[in-house]
């Protein structure tokens, strides 16, 4: 099936309610390509490697979580930015990016998808624009067991600050670089907080509060929302979709 780019982007904007978010970048079409879409590629970040892989596959549009034109970045189209945008324009491929709206979606979002993958029963939301989640495990486990489960599911060993013997029942999580939500998570009375990255001060807070901090990788925690979005749109409109996982150690 063929879908027009404007219909494609309008549907996703409505699905993710992009207009209600105060974000750090534009959500939706960032680079306009050909008007007709048959094949959509998805990936976490619009790196050169992702662009080349999607082009080789024959994508008409690329969906990403991390696109371009971030707040406070250099506005000039030079260097890496020039090469990436030139590649998209040369091959007439559209780039669509969805940042906070994708984090927050209750079903397809990064946090919802990570919670499902790890078996966390979500009880509510917290943090800026209610993006972060909190919930509980099906049954209490030692932190060491939780760590083993996360390692198996994400295929990556997380950095964990906390007593491996500590029982964990209530958890909070927020994918990506959400270490700033740790204090709010502690206030909720959770036993552990999971995110992608860690900062120096998080180590001290974990040590002094006894709440475990789990840094499971920015990329590793955000692979699931954009793939779910691509699969959803492709299935609904009869398009072809392929997720490209360009691994990142961070």
Image: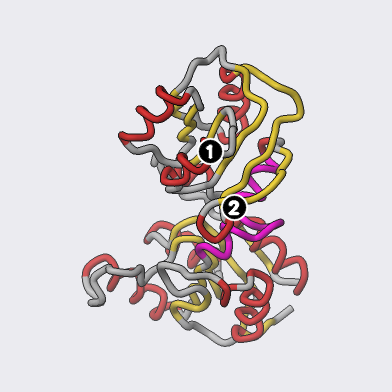
Q: Label 2, label 1: how many angstroms apart (C-alpha)?
A: 23 Å
Q: Which residue is pictured at 57% across the width and 16% down the height?
A: 166
Asked whether 19 or 44 is in front, the reply is: 19
Q: Taking 173 as reference, is 180 left or right?
A: left
The outermost residue toward the top is: 165
Q: Which residue is pictured at 57% across the width and 65% down the height?
A: 101
> Which residue is tagged 2?
110
Asked whether 108 or 94 is in front, the reply is: 108
Which numbered disc, 2 or 1, marks the residue closer to the eye?
Answer: 1
Q: Which residue is pictured at 53% across the width and 85% down the height?
A: 34
Confirm whether the magenta stretch covers residue 238. Answer: no
Q: Is residue 158 above or below residue 112?
A: above
> Which residue is tagged 1?
187
Asked whether 32 or 207 is in front, the reply is: 207
> In the rendering, at what x and y percent does residue 83 appear?
29, 70
The colour style of the image is secondary structure
Say which element carries label 1: helix
Between disc 2 and disc 1, whose residue precedes?
2
Q: Which residue is pictured at 55% across the width and 69% down the height?
A: 58
The image quarter containing residue 72 is: bottom left
Q: Taking 247 as reference, is 70 left or right?
A: left
- Magenta range is 99-117
The image quarter containing residue 108 is: bottom right
Q: Would you call the spot at circle 1 few (<14 residues within 10 Å), some (14-19), or many (20 or more)?
A: few
**Viewport quadrant of the N terminus:** bottom right
Confirm whether the magenta stretch covers residue 101. Answer: yes
> In the rendering, at what x and y percent does residue 104 appear?
60, 59
**Viewport quadrant of the C terminus:** top left
Say which element carries label 2: helix
């Amino acid at each position: 099936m063929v879908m027009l780019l404007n219909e494609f982007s309008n549907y996703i904007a409505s699905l993710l309610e992009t207009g209600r978010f105060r974000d750090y970048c534009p959500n939706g079409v960032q680079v306009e390509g050909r008007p007709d879409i048959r094949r959509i590629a998805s990936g976490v970040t619009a790196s050169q490697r992702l662009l080349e892989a999607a082009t080789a596959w024959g994508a008409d549009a690329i969906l990403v979580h991390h696109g371009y034109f971030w707040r406070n970045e250099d506005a000039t189209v030079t260097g890496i930015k020039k090469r990436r945008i030139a590649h998209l324009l040369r091959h007439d491929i559209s780039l669509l990016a969805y940042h906070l709206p994708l984090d927050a979606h209750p079903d397809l979002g990064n946090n919802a998808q990570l919670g499902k993958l790890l078996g966390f029963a979500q009880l509510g939301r917290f943090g800026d624009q209610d993006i972060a989640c909190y919930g509980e495990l099906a049954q209490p486990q030692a932190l060491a067991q939780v760590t083993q489960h996360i390692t198996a599911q994400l295929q990556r060993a997380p950095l964990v600050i906390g007593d491996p013997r500590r029982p964990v029942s209530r958890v909070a999580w927020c994918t990506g670089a959400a270490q700033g939500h740790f204090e709010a998570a502690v206030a909720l009375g959770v036993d552990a907080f999971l995110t992608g990255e860690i900062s120096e001060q998080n180590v001290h807070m974990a040590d002094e509060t006894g709440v475990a901090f789990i840094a499971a990788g920015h990329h590793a925690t955000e692979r699931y929302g954009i793939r779910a979005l691509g699969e959803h749109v492709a299935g609904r409109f009869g398009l072809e979709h392929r997720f490209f996982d360009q691994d990142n150690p961070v």
